[in-house]
Amino acid sequence: MRICVYGSGSEDINKIYTDATYELGCIMAQKGHTLVFGGGDSGIMGSCAKGVHDNDGKSIGIAPKWIENFEPLCDECTRFIYVESMDERKNKFLENSDAIIVAPGGMGTLDEFFEAITLKKLEQHNKDIIIFNIDNFYEKMFEMLDEMNQKGFLYKPSKTFKKASTVDEIFELLENK
């Protein structure tokens, strides 16, 4: 399975997040899955890729060349797809993956997540989307989404994504459909 992981490229985040995503990468590789990601060599993206590569796994990095002005790119990817824009990048994520995991991140991660669930709701894909809620990172967002649902602003949110707090839970959700 090709699994796209959205997550922060920041180097300033707590080790609890990078340790968990390193473990995610290790297990992905051990199970024979391919990582699809933003191609970054730092933060959550970098730690997940390192876990994959340390276990002889495969990865597909996707990014515009100019992003190197903001963060280093991973040079160990099995394949790297260069794109012109962030929109094209998000489209390539969806084209090249079978499932999506949303790890902790900032605005870019939220942009990717909300676009993926919107497109799923509009039946443009039917990929599993799993929020990796490391250390309850996304609890406030879940509260907001619950309130939006209660007030009638969301359409069947339980069908657009699932939640997991551990790597084991992620693979249980992906493998036991």
Image: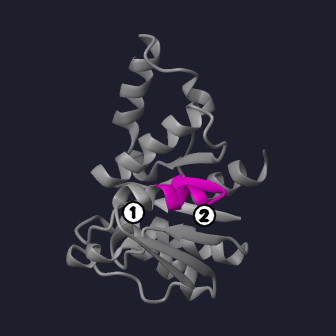
- What kind of element bears circle 2? loop
Position of residue 91 measured from the top left corner of the image (x, y, whole percent): 49, 55
Position of residue 29 measured from the top left corner of the image (x, y, whole percent): 65, 77
Q: Which residue is mark 1?
A: 17
Which quadrant holds the C terminus? top right
Q: Nearer the viewer, mark 1 or mark 2?
A: 2
* Image vertical order of residue 23 relative to residue 87, above or below: below
- Which residue is outermost to the front? 84
Q: Is residue 106 something that shows in the picture?
A: no
Which quadrant holds the N terminus? bottom right
Position of residue 30 measured from the top left corner of the image (x, y, whole percent): 69, 77
Q: Quadrant of residue 68?
A: bottom left
- What kind of element bears circle 1? helix
* Image vertical order of residue 25 relative to residue 174, above or below: below
Q: Is residue 108 something that shows in the picture?
A: yes
Kindly identify which numbered label has been placed on residue 96.
2
Q: What is the span of residues highlighted in magenta in the rendered image?
A: 91-101
The reply to whether the magenta stretch includes residue 125 is no
